Image (spheres, rainbow, N blue to C red):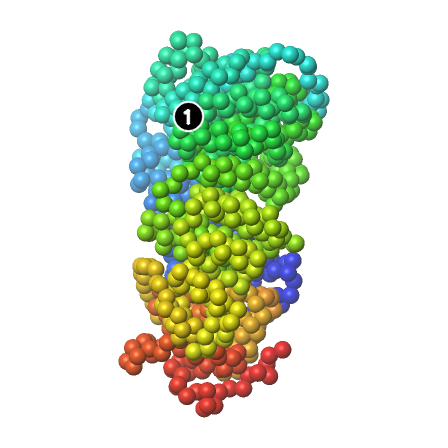
Amino acid sequence: MTADARRIAFTSKTLHHVDLERAAVGALEARDFRRAFALADRRCRILPHPGARAYLLRAEALFRLDLKDAAVASVAKALELEPDDLAAARRMMAWGDGVKQIEAARSIARRDDDPDSVKSALLLLEQSGQDSCARVDFLDEEVKGWVTWRGADDPHLSLAQADQSSTLQLPADPRHRFALNGRRAASFRLMRPASTTSQRLEIAQADRVIASIQLPANRAPDRRNAPQRPLRAGSAETPPLTIIIPVYRDLAATRACIESALTAIACTPGATIVVVDDASPEPDIKRLLGELASEQRIRLLTNAHNLGFVGAVNRALGETHAGDVVLLNSDATVPKYALQRLRSAVRSTPGVGTATPLSNNGEYTSFPVANRSNPLPSPDELDLLDELAGTANSGMAIDIPNGIGFCLYITRECLDAVHALSDDFYRGYLEDVDFCLRAAEAGFRNVCIPSVFVGHEGSRSFLGEKRSLVLRNLRVLEHRYRRYATECAAFLLADPLRDCRAALELKLLADEQRAAAPHVILCGSAIGREIAIKRCRQLAADDERGLIVHFRTEGQRQLAAIFAPDGEIPQSIALDVAAPEGREALLKLLADLRVRSLEIAEPDRIPSACLAQLTHHFTYELLITDTSLAMRAAIGAGLHPDWTGLVEGARHVIAIGEDGAAFSVSVLGLQVVRPSDPPARPVRHPPVSGPARLGLLALHSNAAEFRFVRALSDQLADAHADAGIIVLGTTLDDLRLMQRTNVTVTGEIGVDDVAMLIEGHGITKLVLDIGEPAFGHPLVDALLATGLPTAATEWIPAPAGRGRKTDLKLQPGLDADDAVAAVLDWVVEDVRLHPDWRNGRHRREVGARFP
């Protein structure tokens, strides 16, 4: 593709993502696969969030570049976003292997309308040991599909609902299009009976089940229309409380859940447990439930046919006529006093329809990291979390968009107004959200009670297909409630539960008795944060714990956010250190933690008043991450006078990596401590034919980087028209640089992206810094590990005969003009620049190109 063909008018910020996708398609059609990769990969890194289509475009380009592993990984990402995307499934079946390939084959067999694709999928499934398969399509009035199997016995189809069932034999059709090579097949089509509850369709052959599918109700009861909120009846008596636990699989989780609930109801007057055996296939579960029911410890309802979560819950709700209810997943663990305090909080809070406690795995209500599945604490840890939550957040109720079904408290007033769970959601996902949104329409509040904590292990059934089911049901939900997505986004942005999580974290930190006090690393930028996280990993390798205090400015506030990079507490504590009371709170917190030492990175980015107090109260060390302590970035320049006192008071000066240590010795004149850090394993990349392609790491997104890239682009276009620059990161103005035919800006990247970017772009050389190094940054380490020739500042000259001749060693303190000229000669001439280049022999005048 010519330079003119590559020129794209990337002028619209609002339509940039569309322009990228269109240009990527055009590049694929023109067989310019590197260009197609560059465009599609950038689309995958920018807002708005990319869909499956963007990842498939990138996968196609990678596959055409013979980068199969990266292509398969990109297809896997597309399937994560859109599990039912047939284009992605076809590629995974063709390119992938193992479990992912088999899952893709199942998806194609059950949903693809192309007979040849289905035949290939069935053959692959049979080769993997699956000798039967079925496709079921359903509408309100009919069910149709086909089934394949091997063996003499013909399968049968059964359709069951609460009060009736029917069975249909499926004789083999020898002329069926999928009846090949000994495989038998049959098609079916039948009318669905009208039902206001879900139906269970099952296809079985002899003693094995080929397919089992829950069909949603095809008739809606009239009571669902425009529910009106009734007034709460006043009563001095404590209303009864019914705990409803649907059970299907997993004996261990079921036993733990019921035992914890039994302990909890013993402390909750008027509470009872109703367990619904939803036709569990596990004899041990049936035995356990039978024993508990015979001892009258639970009330047991048994379904003859599996009705799914919604059907099981609705049956129990239909037989519970008074009092509030709690829907409890069978993989939840309830602390001893949780139900008692949950009921008390709900009954003392006006207008509540549903309430959800904090949990380790509760989406909005997750702790310590919100919206994440955190590990399930032990029973003793859960009791402590619940006790401390009760102290930290007593009397609080925070409104949330919807409750979460792992432990959903529903008041009787709400239940009488909203009635049962909806059958419109396939396989029991998001029906709790629908119920809560209907409750909100009826005037009730959905709240989180942060003074209660309940454990939740997470989905233990349908693990492989859960995302597909959730996304399918989410489309129904968003169609029904148009404002729901916007309300969720606003809630996530505001994060009103953050203060509640922080309060609980402070209680936990005060309660903890750690054998080893933590090291605390202070930083003040995104770059410093990444280096601090790396430093914490070094500490963890020595069995020591590291915490990070990240200072950032938000409006008039100067926040100190304290977090543990390993995902443990704390995660949500943020103190405003612009005010004296905020600084005192930070000092007290660190003192209570019995900090072993402070490691101060980026002191110029830490509020001066806060820095002075911290260094006065704690032993500290300096962590060299950049050149900010120097008078100037030149050999022998020495310390800036502003930092002399800080350095003299430090116990040690720590440098991460060889370059940081060399800078400290040669520029600052300081002796440093270097932590042990196992070197990254080199990842060699095969040589790339074609024009030079320079990868330039952009970490700062500042004016200096932008001007450097623009000037180098100008000169490179004159000297080598086919050479290109790939900016690894973001800049001040990506679109303006992307308008140049020899510049591509990737967007934000991570360490795991490096190998794909090097090979996809065909990068031949790397520029790691242009005078603003980030010592110890993980991206620098990952790029060095590629083994490609690199350009970087040389803080201490290598001894004669050592060092690679292919690398460009930039002298410290180089101005922008000189750096551009040096890199240009290195790229174009492909030789190491002569040491006396600064006297003008290799100098190119480029300053006029700067703004």
Q: Is residue 318 above or below residue 831?
A: above
Left or right of 783? Residue 579 is right
Q: Secondary structure at mark 1?
A: strand
Q: State the image coordinates of residue 43 (x, y, percent, origin top left).
A: 54, 58
> Image quarter for residue 488?
top right
Disc 1 marks which residue?
A: 203
Q: State the image coordinates of residue 219 (x, y, percent, origin top left).
A: 61, 22
Report if residue 696 is visible in the image.
no
Residue drawn at x 46%, y 53% as measured from the top left: 618
Residue drawn at x 39%, y 70% as measured from the top left: 670
Image quarter in which the C terminus is found: bottom right
Q: Is residue 166 above or below residue 436?
A: above
Residue farthest along the left direction in this orientation: 801
Residue drawn at x 33%, y 48% as measured from the top left: 543
Q: Is residue 137 above or below residue 288?
A: below
Left or right of 482? Residue 428 is left
Q: State the image coordinates of residue 493 (x, y, percent, origin top left).
A: 61, 45
Residue drawn at x 32%, y 59% as measured from the top left: 676
Q: State the image coordinates of residue 27 (x, y, percent, origin top left).
A: 52, 64
Q: Nearer the viewer, residue 484 or 180?
A: 484
Report if residue 294 is visible in the image.
yes
Q: Residues within 10 Å of mark 1 (few under 14, many from 20)?
A: many
Q: Nearer the viewer, residue 133 or 421?
A: 421
Going by the numbered disc 1, the residue's amino acid type is Ile
Q: Nearer the viewer, residue 201 or 472?
A: 472
Q: Nearer the viewer, residue 665 or 36?
A: 665
